[in-house]
Amino acid sequence: MAKAKEFEFEKPAPVIEEEDETTLAAIDEGIRDAKAGRTVALEKVRKLLPKWITASSSRKER
């Protein structure tokens, strides 16, 4: 079995040229929120996820 890749969270990933400033700002905000402890527990996300997903965003039938 292949070994899972270890992530270096303290070393930022390179910025892709196509990322716009709004996207980068949203990522930075998310990182700040996570560091400040403003997160949602996985079990709560699992309960909320069906409410977040709408019919318009679901996969098209094949």
Image (spheres, rainbow, N blue to C red):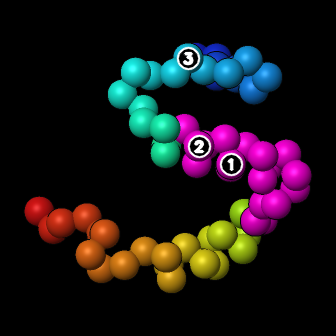
Give the percent coordinates (x, y) of residue 39. 78, 60
Q: Disc 1 marks which residue?
A: 29
Q: Mark 2, mark 3: which one is toward the viewer? A: 2
| 43 and 39: which is toward the camera | 39
| Range of residues picked out in magenta | 24-41
Residue 48 to residue 61: above or below:
below
Residue 30 covered by magenta stretch:
yes
Q: Amino acid at mark 1?
A: Glu
Q: Disc 2 marks which residue?
A: 25
Which residue is at 59% across, 43% downward? 25
State how far apart marks 1 and 2 are (Cα): 6 Å
Q: Amino acid at mark 3?
A: Pro
State how far apart marks 2 and 3 are (Cα): 15 Å
Give the percent coordinates (x, y) of residue 60. 18, 66
| 43 and 28: which is toward the camera | 28
Residue 50 to residue 2: above or below:
below
Q: Along the horizontal axis of the image, is 58 left or right of 35?
A: left
Q: Amino acid at mark 2?
A: Ala
Which residue is at 58% across, 48% downward? 26
Q: Disc 3 marks which residue?
A: 14
Label 1–label 2 contact, CB within 8 A: yes
Residue 27 covered by magenta stretch:
yes
Q: Which mark is residue 43?
A: none
Mark 1 packing: few (<14 Cα in 10 Å), some, or many (20+)?
A: few
